[in-house]
Image (cartoon, rainbow, N blue to C red):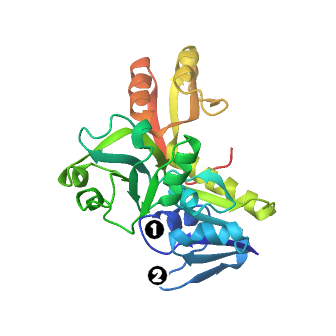
Amino acid sequence: MLRIAVPNKGTLSAPAAQMLRDAGYRQRTDGKDLVCRDEDNAVEFFYLRPRDIATYVGSGDLDLGITGRDLLVDSGVPAREVLDLGFGGATFRWAAPAGSLGSAAEIGGRRIATAYPGVVERYLEEHDLKADVVRLDGAVENAVRLGVADLIADVVETGTTLRQAGLVTVGEPLLRSSAILIGRQEATEPRAAQLVRRLQGVLVARSYVMLAYDVRADLLENATALTPGIESPTVSPLHREGWVAVQAMVRRVDVHRIMDELYELGARAILVTDIANCRL
């Protein structure tokens, strides 16, 4: 039976569980449950602290897990990123008092406060820099004001909290994180590949819709140029002579523009349908 870790709380918990449901897997109905067995799919889900998931997967005790890229990097365990799940985005930035740092290249030799020492240490190693990393559990914005550090490395959203602490961001982000599916380095379980295909199907379904319309046959080439589909659109003759029906997958973000352009071209009966899941 495939053993998979799922976040038990936090911002990743609900989206992860919903994505697994959309992929056809049973999930717990009581938030206090620690384990959920899906006998039909031969999968067992374990609900764990997001920060612990990489450790369980890296040790080989669990086959797969859903966690943040930042938490995987921070853990330093031998687990691999399998699939970006497209939610839970976060950006890690350097922040320091205005005018104290010109670029991230100047952080060498300074004290850096962070709740993610593994993320910072990997950056320092990759850029051949040395600095003192001060680990804090939270509220790192106050570290500079209290004299604990010269700069911080933390998740930055709007920057409001930084400004209140008298800090500004410096240089490019040191990490862009999101929710990811992680696996053991040596994992070859066939059901793991099936899970990945299902999740990929959910990702595609969330990004695309099915667009159907009728158009005159002499306008078909122009119409399908707007709706090429994933591989090719489906074209069927209509009972009305000289007209065809077309179906194609189009990106959700583009669908309204494409509908307008199709209508101006002469297409009619333009319909949009959500895709629950797919296999491509």
Residue pushed farthest top? 218
Quadrant of the frame with the N terminus: bottom right
- Viewer-nearest residue: 162 or 43: 162
Q: Is residue 43 left or right of 86 when viewed as pictured?
A: right
Q: Cα distance, mark 2 to mark 1? A: 10 Å
For image coordinates 42% across by 69% down, the residue present is 10
Q: Does any portion of residue 216 appear in the rendered image?
A: no
> How would you rate the neighbour count of disc 1 (Cα within 10 Å): few for under 14, some for 14-19, many for 20 or more?
few
Foreground of the two, 188 or 224: 188
Q: Residue furthest front?
A: 109
On screen, residue 144 versus residue 55, left or right, reads left
Residue 257 seen in the figure: yes
In the depicted structure, whether residue 215 falls above or below residue 174:
above
Q: Tell me the quarter of the image containing the C terminus.
A: top right
Task: Locate residue 116, reporting x and y percent.
Answer: 46, 60
Badge number at residue 31: 2
User: Could you tell me residue 89's position as x and y percent?
Assistant: 44, 51
Name the amino acid, label 1. Ala
State the image quarter where residue 165 is shown: bottom left
- Which label number is shown at residue 110? none
Q: Residue at x 61, y 58 (%)?
A: 181
Residue 56 percent across, percent down from the top left: 65, 72
Q: Secondary structure at mark 2?
A: loop
Residue located at (39% from left, 28% from top): 257
- In the picture of the structure, the residue carrying the numbered disc 1 is 14
Q: Residues within 10 Å of mark 2 (few under 14, many from 20)?
A: few
The type of residue carrying mark 2 is: Gly
Label 1's element?
A: helix
Q: In terms of depth relative to the viewer, which is nearer, 59 or 278?
A: 59
Give x and y (percent) for residue 130. Answer: 51, 47
